[in-house]
Image: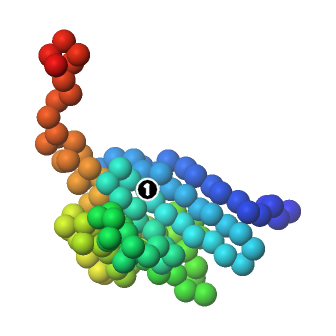
Amino acid sequence: MTTPLPQTITRELKFKNGTAKGTSNRWHKGQYCSILTEAGIVGCGIYDLKTAAEFDLAIAICKGTLAKPLVDPEDLFESKIVGATPKAEAMGIRTGITGREAVELMLKAQSSDRSSEPAPRSPANK
């Protein structure tokens, strides 16, 4: 039995440094996948790094092949990063590391960003 298209699958993924959302979108003769963290996205090559950089977004991409396409978010785990925006590079993400390593760096960056933020002020202290 084939699954009707288009199809979107989203699931929580657990990593050493936290959790992220994995997504797979599929349509006739096409698909893409990504792992979304609070700090940014590790995704397949469908993401345009130039546009993402213009908006100061942290994006790192892996690239599948016709023989081994990136379909599910878990396919990104062992895939190698082939490009990243300057914001992602500032987190330590570089070409050649795995998608899993890039997600861990994004999760680590988001937790350190949160710890450096000032505590929210209560209405009584404003």
Residue 77 shows in this picture: yes
Classify the position of the N terminus by image quarter: bottom right
Q: What element carries label 1?
A: strand
- Disc 1: which residue: 36
Colouring style: rainbow
Q: Residue at x 37, y 82 (%)?
A: 82
Q: Position of residue 37 (x, y in %)?
A: 38, 53
Q: Nearer the viewer, residue 118 or 74?
A: 118
User: In the picture shown, does residue 69 fall above or below 15?
Assistant: below
Q: Which residue is drawn at 18% across and 47% down?
A: 112
Which residue is outermost to the front? Answer: 126
Report whether 62 appears left or right of 86: right
Q: Residues within 10 Å of mark 1 (few under 14, many from 20)?
A: many
User: In the picture shown, does residue 57 fall above or below 62?
Assistant: above
Q: Where is residue 55 in the image (x, y as percent from the top left)?
A: 33, 65
Classify the position of the C terminus by image quarter: top left
Q: Which residue is drawn at 19% across and 12% down?
A: 124
Which residue is outermost to the top? Answer: 124
Report whether 122 appears left or right of 37: left
Q: Where is residue 118 in the image (x, y as percent from the top left)?
A: 14, 34
Q: Nearer the viewer, residue 39 or 121?
A: 121
Q: Which of 31 and 87 is in front in this view?
A: 87
Q: Where is residue 13 in the image (x, y as percent from the top left)?
A: 46, 51
The amino acid type, in three-letter code, at marker 1 is: Leu
Q: Which residue is drawn at 77% across and 63% down?
A: 5
Q: How many labels does the image show?
A: 1
Residue 93 shows in this picture: no
Q: Nearer the viewer, residue 38 or 76?
A: 38
Which residue is outermost to the right? Answer: 1
